[in-house]
Amino acid sequence: MNYFELLQSPRVENPIVLTGLDKEMYCHDMSSKQFTALERLTVAYFSGSEREEPCDILLEPTFMVSDELKRLLSMYDKEIAFKGIQALPTVEECGLYPLYWVPYFSEIACIHKDSIVYDNGMLSSLILDGSKIGKQDVFRLSGSLEYKIIVSMPVAESILRRRFYGVGLKKLEVAG
């Protein structure tokens, strides 16, 4: 099966920047205990500037997905837990009130032995070990310093059919 890294598109120049969130609580390397401690729904703010792009994936202060992308990911993996962030503009003229979700994905240690890893733990060349993935459609890569979300071909196709904004997919090599 083919797999892809789910990421924010490099074409996005000015994603919405959320303020009012504790960066120590909302971090990329969040443990299950830290995730459980988050409020079910919280409020954050953004400038409301016309230049800001309301993407379907945000990376700061942690990985977040839009409400529509949350629904799609949940169709493929009902075990993904989510905590909500209602984004409110700081200017009244902005009529945009996006809802984002912080997902907690299951982790799979599936880095193939032929992957190239720098001494500091960052990946130079990622190769997935297909024998360790099983039938998982959406998961977080374990064993790397980098925060990588991996999706299967059916999930990637569903994402492309729906024309999400600011979502990137990078094809990954799979061995085994």
Image: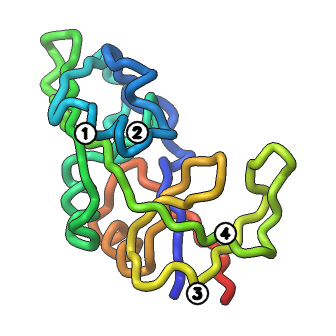
| Residues at marks 1 and 4 touching, judged by CB atoms closer than 8 Å | no
Residue shown at the point (46%, 84%) measured from the top left: 134
Label 2 CA crowd tier, 10 Å (few <14, some 14–19, many 20+): many
Badge 1 or badge 2: first in the primary sequence: 2
Residue wearing tag 4: 111
Residue 130 horizontal side relative to residue 48, left or right: right
Residue wearing tag 3: 131
Label 3 CA crowd tier, 10 Å (few <14, some 14–19, many 20+): few
Badge 3 or badge 1: first in the primary sequence: 1
Residue 156 horizontal side relative to residue 71, left or right: right
Q: Residue furthest front?
A: 33
Residue shown at the point (57%, 59%) measured from the top left: 142
What numbered label is drawn on residue 58? 2
In this figure, which colouring scheme has been used for the structure? Answer: rainbow
Nearer the observer: mark 3 or 2; the answer is: 3
Is 80 in front, or is 155? 80
Disc 4 residue type? Ile
Residue wearing tag 1: 100
Nearer the observer: mark 1 or 4; the answer is: 4
Query: Please, what secondary structure does the residue beneath circle 1 have?
Result: strand
Cα distance, mark 3 to mark 4?
11 Å
Badge 3 or badge 4: first in the primary sequence: 4
Residue shown at the point (67%, 77%) measured from the top left: 173
Give above or below for 164 relative to 159.
above
| Residues at marks 1 and 2 touching, judged by CB atoms closer than 8 Å | yes
Label 1 CA crowd tier, 10 Å (few <14, some 14–19, many 20+): many
Cα distance, mark 3 to mark 1?
33 Å
